[in-house]
Image (cartoon, rainbow, N blue to C red):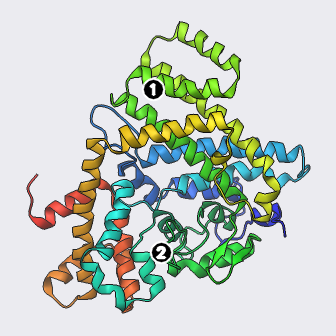
Amino acid sequence: MSMRWEKILSLQRSASSGTEFDIRSQFQRDYDRIIFSSPFRRLQNKTQVFPLPGSVFVHNRLTHSLEVASVGRSLARMVAQSLLQGPEKGNHLLHEMDTVVAAACLAHDLGNPPFGHSGEKAISSYFSEGNGQDLKFKVSEHQWADLIAFEGNANAFRILTHSFNGRRQGGYALTFATLAALVKYPYPSYPPGRKKYGMFHSEIATFSEIARACGIPCLDEASGQYARSPLVYLVEAADDISYLVMDIEDAHKLGILNTDETEQMLMEFLHASGQNDMIERKERVYSEVTDTNERIAYLRATVINLLIREVSKIFMYHYEAIMNGSFDTALVSKLSENIKSALDNCRKQSVQKIYNHPEVVKIELTGYNVLGWLMNEFSEAVLNSGTAYNNKLLSLMPDQFRPQSDDVYTRIQSVLDFVSGMTDLYAVQLYKDLRGIAG
């Protein structure tokens, strides 16, 4: 059975709010709630790939999220335009598709812990390799699967939907349409072995409610796997396009990639497209613009626009499969062979020259040391709160994260909520303060 936009773009919320005098649409309110939230603001001090800036400003999680939202809005607007001219002619709900996608894009990295993806690994390692191993038989198999593979995507969904202490019911009470568009992996961590997942054990019921409201079918009840909201594909594509291209520009600014190889990588897209007018336009721009960074920025913008157009066509080509829940891959994987080759080259160069750069590796190692130690100290504190030292530690946790249950999984989740929400600088400073390290 095919999903329908009337359900996908559900206005339902876990808690009602707002006033009759609000000039914004329901989905615009979602966007604003995210952009004014504390978790979003803290993204400005969370690593994207490179260390936080000194004299050269590269991307952090906040600037990355804003750019993904910009790409996502353009992509959704292009898809909506095609739908309104074709299979969904006259469906005025689709005029809001771009706002829903932009809001979900803004939120897609909210759950990332300090130090980027290495932070996820550091937290997971505490349970799979560190002192956290002792907890294995104190929680259920499903809960243990969460702990040994901490997932930023699932954490973002929790941040937006969980009722933290002293906060309102339903978290940020976003529309179900926006929340469904955020869940890239619509299944839990169990059975084990899933590389990624979209919800912790504690939020399974919440997602099920959202899926039902949005008309998203369950594909396998035994494993808890649902189809994706069609909007997820656009959010995912916006992220894929943004980080692969923007990491290349950042690496150029930092001198990791020289100008010639950066231009060559970006020009590969233009040649692959077969659109000579873009190459001719590039030559005209280059005859006027001599600043190297501006030239690279122009090529980057051209490549992103090209990819937005191509991905929107792919969405429309696979529209039926996307709507009936049988499409099961990223849109960028369906790019034409030549353009996909250019994108794969960006990914390959990023792995070889960027993600394994010594400065990036240092950040990863810092994450392991800092987050591993903090996880150990605060986990001990919430599980053994009888000592004076542990009670002092617990006093450092904000009230919203204080454990309110004797359940081991719930108490450990309170630590995960606290530690994963830290900025890079706060985590390092707290680590130094508690260990008595000067500087």
Q: Position of residue 384 (x, y in %)?
A: 23, 88
Q: Position of residue 289 (x, y in %)?
A: 50, 11
- Disc nearer the start of the sequence (2/1): 2
Question: Is residue 395 in view?
Answer: no
Seen in the picture, residue 184 relative to 265 is either above or below; the reply is: below
> Which residue is at 48% across, 56% downward?
109
Q: Quadrant of residue 325?
A: bottom right
Q: Nearer the viewer, residue 137 or 388?
A: 137
Q: Secondary structure at mark 1?
A: helix
Q: Position of residue 415 (x, y in %)?
A: 33, 75
Measure how far apart labels 2 and 1 are at the Cα level. 47 Å
**Amino acid residing under circle 2:** Arg
Q: Position of residue 141 (x, y in %)?
A: 45, 86
Q: Which residue is mark 1?
A: 262
> Which residue is at 33% across, 44% downward?
356
In the figure, is residue 212 to the left or right of 202? right
| Mark 2 and mark 1 residues within 8 Å of each other at the beta carbon | no
Q: Quadrant of residue 112?
A: bottom left
Q: Residue furthest top?
A: 287
Q: Residues within 10 Å of mark 1 (few under 14, many from 20)?
A: some
Q: Which residue is mark 2?
A: 167
Q: Quadrant of residue 172?
A: bottom right
